[in-house]
Amino acid sequence: MEPTPTTATHAEPGGVRRTRGVIDLRSDTVTRPTPEMRRAMAEAEVGDDVYGDDPTVNRLQAGAAEIFEREAALFVPSGSMGNLVAMLCHTRPGDEIIFEERGHSCLFEMASVSAIAGCMPRTRYVDDGILSWDLIEPLIRTKLYYRAQTALIVLENTHNMAGGTVYPQHISDDICDRAHAAGLPVHLDGARIFNAAVALGRSVAELTRKFDSVMFCLSKGLGAPVGSMLVGSSDFIDAARIKRKLLGGGMRQAGVLAAAGLVALEKSPSRLHEDHENARFLAERLNELPGVRVDLKKVQTNIVFFDVADTSRSAAAIAADLAKRNVLCSATGPTAIRMLTHCDVDRAGIERGLAELRAVLAAA
């Protein structure tokens, strides 16, 4: 028996989803598999993936590699594991890795860069999260044998904690070109790279071609219940498979999960523009509320941050009051709140969430 739904929608015949119950805007990770995904999971042909025998996993990996125009791909249980596997492949203990200060793999992955990979983060804060070579170059260590050496640069596109901002391709390409000239690989945390592709009107292959490795999530905006992918050269993926096993990420009959990923890859990118439109609608309406401020320049995809300092209430208090009204969001600082749009909250749900926030502010 299925648990009581806690997200914002239910499925109608044909897989169309409508708003009811809780409006969950905490993240696009809260999406529930579509009826088509559930059917695919139930009917999936499976084998033992540790032996390379799961045909559905193999189809997913081949499909991801084709979409990104790479030699190979690897299915991993989570984006955090995918990023860590890449870092393990590109570095050795004692190395340094360059991140934007709020990068997900630096801030929100349990310090695995240090605790497991044995590397030191070297960071630079940028307001919109978008690094350039001019900001990166001063962070690269000179080659002295008694100092930690820079071994890897990690970019994030879209940048979660900067508000879903998108790397212009000429900037990320320039970083890759200059890093390679300096003998440094570049890994992309592309958890939401399909959102970036929609925002820029380019393919994910175009946007990521110059990166040495790319991780992207199936379980965020694409709506699959579990899993992420690593893509790169055949040699890189061979090494990544070993590191995945080292971390306990070898799965057996994983085709039941990969089947949902195949549906996500085929069907979900074409509707991501709806999430972006809903985020823009949400941001513009939030900006009309008393005491609420949104930097509309940063609302480029499906992530909206807003500041509530002028309401004289804390972000945590407002989020708690919204939760009592069945609207879920995340307080990310004393006065900052984050909301993400996704396939399980439609325009009517966004409008209801705004109405509840308006009531919370009025009650205060």
Image (cartoon, rainbow, N blue to C red):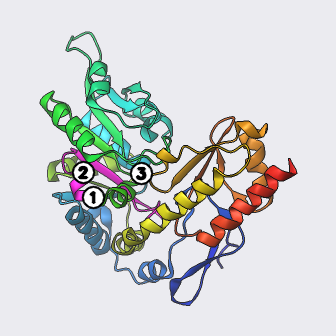
Compute the Cα span from label 3 to label 2: 17 Å
Of 302 and 291, which appears nearest the observer? 291
Residue extent of the magenta highlight: 203-227
- Residue 294: x %, y % from top left: 59, 45
Number of other residues with Cα within 10 Å of mark 1, as a class: few under 14, some 14 to 19, many 20 or more = some
Residue located at (43% from left, 39% from top): 105
**Corner quadrant of residue 124:** top left
Q: Magenta includes 235?
A: no
Residue 253 in sight here:
no
> Is 151 displayed left or right of 275 in the figure?
left
Q: CA distance from mark 1 to mark 2?
A: 6 Å
Near-viewer residue (57 or 263): 263
Q: Amino acid at mark 2?
A: Thr
Residue plotted at (35% across, 50% down): 190
| Residue hosting label 3 | 79
Residue named by callout 1: 204
Seen in the picture, residue 363 relative to 97 is either above or below; the reply is below
136 versus 171 height, above or below: above
Helix, strand or loop for disc 2: helix
Proximity of marks 1 and 2: CB atoms separated by less than 8 Å: yes
Where does residue 37 sit, x and y in percent of width and height? 45, 77
- Report which residue position mark 2 lands on: 208
Q: Amino acid at mark 3?
A: Gly
Which residue corresponds to the image point at 39% horizontal and 58% vertical from the top-left?
A: 195
Q: Pick out the residue farthest to the left.
A: 181
The image shows residue 130 at horizontal and vertical percentages of 37, 37
